[in-house]
Image (spheres, coloured by chain):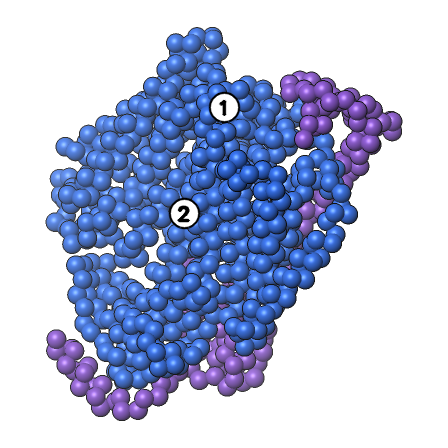
Amino acid sequence: MKKLTVLFSLMFFVCVANATEDQITFKSEQQKSTYLELTAELRCPKCQNQNIADSNAVVAKDMRVKVKALLDEGQDKEQVIQYMINRYGQFAHYQPPLNVATSLLWLMPIGFILFAVVLQVKRSKSKNDVNVSETGAVQLDSGQLDRELELLLESNTLDGSSVDNSSKDNKQ
Amino acid sequence: MIPELGNFALYIAFAFSILLSIFPAIGLKQNNTRLMAMAPNLTIGLFVFTLFSFACLAYAFLTDDFTVVNVAQNSNSLLPIHYKFAASFGSHEGSFLLWLLMQSGWSFAVAIFSKGLPVDMRTRVLTVLGWISVGFYAYIIISSNPFERTLPYFPIDGRDLNPLLQDIGMIIHPPLLYMGYVGLSIAFAFAIAALLSGNLDSTWAKWSRPWTAAAWAFLTLGLTIGSWWAYSELGWGGWWFWDPVENAAFMPWLVATALLHSLAVSEKRNAFKSWTVFLAIAAFSLSLLGTFLVRSGVIVSVHAFATDPERGVFILVLLTLVIGGSLLLYSLKAGNIKSFGKFSVFSRESMLWSNNVLLVAATMVVLMGTLLPLVHKQIGLGTISIGEPFFNQMFTYLIVPFALLLGIAPLVRWKQDKLNNFIAKPLVVIAISLTLSLTWLFAEFDEIKPLALLGATLFIWIMLFTALELKQTLNKVSFSKLPLSHFSMVLGHIGIAFILAGVGLTSQYSVERDVKMNIGDSAELKGYEFTFEQINNIKGPNYEGWAAEIYITKQNKFVAELHAEKRFYPVQRNTMTEAAIDAGFFRDIYISLGERLPDGAWALRIYVKPYIRWIWLGGIIVALGGFLTLFDRRYRNKKALAKG
């Protein structure tokens, strides 16, 4: 309760004005958004896994102040990131650098998609030969027969001829 | 006494799992129906004793039995009773017992609800679940026993539950997430059972589908609630951080989503057979990998449990056995199945194949992004961080084709369709979507941001196509005859649309101010006037602190009165920010109270976050879609199931 009274008395003195100060005054909206982007992308080196915007650690606070100071000096986003990386290491930026090892991050998913597309186009090309000449409507549901058909199909497409294909696929 | 009973029940459950993993399997080998019939009963026993064991642990927590190490370390006599319950799964040991409860609960459900299955199939599935259980029960008994005692010198009071976890989210998020995580073991068990039987026709897909849908729906809900919890509890307004532990739960979800779609193809078209099996194995393997990452301490995360290398090694062995064993079986049994189905480049199958490819590519992005920093450091290239900028960039690229295909895929016919039918329609729809989303953004925001426009356009695109598809289908089939699983799809897709719009808009148009306020001060943000009315000392059951009262108006009209708190938990000596949120369909107002500045003023962070609720709304809609599948007649009718 004592704390409260002290606080209240303090406040009566201070709060005559109604305007509110921002903790940080930005030169422009542009600077503010760059600052917010940077503090979200830079990693607090001492924390478990937090960016410097969310962390209350001392080092995160220092880094926030430094980011603002560098922006005020007129440095752009890339320069600030570079400064932080030079000072705290690559670890301090959530975007990985591009090198032989990290290139896998991009190459693997892209490679997989390309592989799948090529596979699919190739496969359905061979299938189209079959579809053209489809006739019967025999329903088969056994895995064994299916597999045999598949083998038959493949051997036929290999030598380029089409085949009368009857399978369950004719059933919509 | 009660903890000893719990411990004892855990050992009995372990014994049940050993029996379950051996005798029904022998029964299968010798075609002995009596041995096979043991499987459901052993599963019931497994579940009952695990449930009893968990109840004993919960009892120890609820009665403040500080002679149990786990209770002494994670609870406190002053902790509110519902958090005492939640604390029983707040530690590594306790959460693992919850995991086992879920595991045995799912197995129990299979034993009870799959009487329509052929005896051999049911036995195989339960046996596989038994094998998994043996590993997990051995793990908890050997390295993570939650019933260890502090005796003879026990503390008078406990060290309290981490204040971060003292939230309603802690009560619902872990059980839901574990239901999903562990539920994927059922899809895995069905896949392995199908491989073992060598019969990979459409029947097993039909059996596995409702179970997979249920697990996936729980996982969706768990992730959604987790995201909402992080947002409301952590105090900085973020809803997804690409933290390794979040990624660990997201990867199984991505693969399970692919699995759900591939199962549909397997069931309806008897295609994608071995691929579907592979996805089922991958989904469960990734949930095990997630467990390993979270509990071994190999990754740095905000979620980290108290970690212990011994535990990590054990899970790694388990992981290797499961992945290695199942992939070996897969290569032996599924390697000779070449049938992928016969369909043309432009067909429903092809669309669903693209869905799978994109989801697997997304999984690769997350997997690589989570694990590469470890490898990078190990091979001496230095420490790197992979986070938001990388993942956001990759997911933006992946989501565009994914969402576009998601829109049209349900309209494309199975096997073969004419591409010509799909030139005019998408062009018209994309034109309408763009116009509508531009109008929307112009009307509501000051500027058009490309990523927001993307999210909004994809939202409208999916909504329009979903409506179109529903209309076309209802022309052919009457509303009452339409299978429920069709509505599942509709809900699933609409939910994704909402998530896309929510993510796009909130990430681009959220605004914040970091202000310094005294009593009586007011600050403006996005047309809202925030007045700092007063600040009061508060005292909770196990904390004390400050509550700031903030009065919000818009154009002199009352909007809300919020209480943002700063709490101090003396037992753990932790200060927590309890953000105040005025939630709305179109926007959230979010205030978190910072520290008191030397001059007596208070630091406050004020956010206005448009459409952020749509993310969780979307997640809930998606999950509802998953649950709806369970009520589909096809999966409930025993005769239909037996016929396959």
In the rendered structure, which disc, 2 or 1, sits on the residue that comes first in sequence?
Answer: 2
Q: Check disc 1: other Cα within 10 Å, few if <14, some if 14-19, many if 20+.
A: many
Q: Which quarter of the figure is the N terminus of chain B placed in?
A: top left
Chain B image colour: blue
- Residue found at x 23% / y 45%: B85
Numbered mark located on residue B641 in the image: 1
Contact? badges 2 and 1 (CB < 8 Å): no
Q: Check disc 2: other Cα within 10 Å, few if <14, some if 14-19, many if 20+.
A: many
On the image, the x and y values in percent for residue B313 come to: 42, 38
Location of residue B202 by image quarter: top right
Report if residue B400 is visible in the image.
yes
Instruction: Judge if badges 2 and 1 mark residues of a common chain.
Output: yes
Q: What residue type is labelled 2?
A: Gly
Chain designation of label 2: B
Q: In this view, does A10 lie above or below B441?
A: below
For mark 2, what is the residue? B222
Q: What residue type is labelled 1?
A: Leu
- Residue found at x 34% / y 19%: B41
Viewer-side residue, A94 vs B584: B584
